Image (cartoon, rainbow, N blue to C red):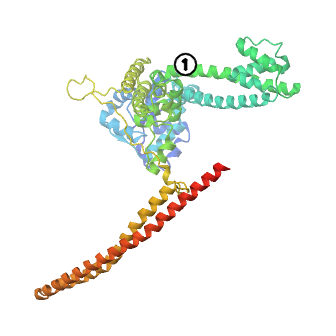
Amino acid sequence: MLVLFETAAGYAIFKVLDEQKLQQVDSLWKEFETPEKANKVLKLKHFEKFQDTTEALAAATALVEGKLGKTLKKVLKKVVAKEAHEELAIADVKLGGIIKDKLNLSCVHSPAVAELMRGIRGQMEGLITGLPPREISAMSLGLAHSLSRYKLKFSPDKVDTMIVQAISLLDDLDKELNNYIMRCREWYGWHFPELGKIVTDNLAYCKTVRKIGDRTNVASSDLSDILPEEIEAEVKLAAEISMGTEVSEEDIGNIMHLCDQVIEISDYRGQLYDYLKNRMMAIAPNLTVLVGELVGARLISHAGSLLNLAKHPASTVQILGAEKALFRALKTRRDTPKYGLIYHASLVGQTTAKNKGKISRALAAKTALATRYDALGEDTNAEMGAENRAKLEARLRFLEEKGIRRISGSGKALARADKYQHKSDIKVYDPSGDSTLPTASKKRKIEEVEEAVEEEKPVEAKAKKAKKETPQEEAQVPAEAEAETETPKKKKKKDKKRKAEEEEGAAAAAATAEEVTEEAAEAAAPAEETTEKKKKKKKKQVKEEEGE
């Protein structure tokens, strides 16, 4: 039986001298207590040493991923193929299956083989001759570092971890700067409140405070290198008539120290932004061209790494950073968000609110392609990103111009659409229903009173007629109902009686009408007399007033 043993320095193939001892698994460790005992069980047949750390890393990664490396394949063909009838003991079952498929060698893996490997590892220096212990330890250390870098996807050219840290620090610096500047303005505002309204730029404000100190020094200080001439003259004028309180030199010293901190942090922030910009152009040039340095860095930071971002589909890239809004919308069954961090890209920012969703969807699709090209491609140029950006800008112009083209026909002519005109019925509020008071005046003329009296009398006469006619009509209704149920003979008799009653009723109505007309005439006569008397009284009053 042959044994394949992997080390950091190379591949070793041993031959088992006494196979019967492998059957005693529990007592096998006793055979490897000393190098002399181990040499009685195993004998080194061949050792293939690695040339450098790169070859060792390639072999180790192949073993980790369960693949057959080139070096191992050569060794097996050279040594083991000569003794194909013997079994090959291996530590990894997957590797044994690959060797069996490709080289047609019978491989063995059992608890006895695992115990044998443990014994070889313990007495490796005594079993492998011609390899000093110092060299084995150096090779082990170098391979461990190389394998760790590989597992962490560490590459000196593409260090996306630096981008994640840089963008996080940049955001923290912005927050701290805002807090410091707010504190500085509020603190110095007690001494010179007018300066905060005149100088709006934060960095210029801190530099001005740092230079002048107490407001009494404004007249003698030169601010031309910080502020324009007009603002400088305004500051000097405001210092003479300032409403601020007096402060001690110790207070001014603390304020100036705070201004120094703000100026230093602002300078460092500028340096950090330049560093981030260069890093983004080196690691993800196509992504940087499409969405910009800050948005691209935030996308990488949110995903964890450039490779993780490349694994995301375009729909996920579109809403990265809006997870809270997405799950809230899904929970409440409302519209999901259209954009996340990608909203801050320049292409989305320059569109109208109507087309932001469409552009963000198109930009997310191109961003996903650019990220995969940057993460997995070998080229480091930004041609693909520039080309996609040009396409997106053309698409943006098309949407802004509302160029809806026809599907049928040549597809070149613009579709004709009539101009939309919004038509709505405007209803005017009627205030007449608000008041319950009568619109007419309380005092009426004599002529209006006479007309009202004349109109009321014929209405009363008509009302009397109606009251007299109503009992006759009520009597007719039950008579008609009875007539329908009676026989034809009785109907004739009833008809005769009804005619006679109708004639009598007509005569009575005529008599009552005459009486009503007489009464109306009698009532009208005194009414006329009263109106004439009123007229005479009014004339007398007018004459008396004129005489007076």
Is residue 313 in view from this perspective?
no
Q: Please, is residue 297 above or below residue 324 in the view? A: above
For disc 1, the neighbor class at 10 Å (few under 14, some 14 to 19, many from 20) is few
Q: Nearer the viewer, residue 424 or 508?
A: 508
x and y, in percent, of residue 13 in the image: 42, 32
Q: Nearer the viewer, residue 417 or 347?
A: 417
Q: Residue at x 53, y 26 (%)?
A: 131
Q: Quadrant of residue 185?
A: top right
Q: Is residue 166 left or right of residue 416?
A: right
The furthest residue to the front:
547
x and y, in percent, of residue 2 in the image: 39, 36
**Dot 1 amino acid type:** Asn
x and y, in percent, of residue 361 in the image: 40, 33
Q: Quadrant of residue 87?
A: top left
The residue where tag 1 is placed is 278
Q: Please, is residue 27 above or below residue 252 in the view? A: below
Q: Nearer the viewer, residue 156 or 245?
A: 245
Q: Residue at x 50, y 20 (%)?
A: 281
Q: Is residue 76 left or right of residue 290?
A: left
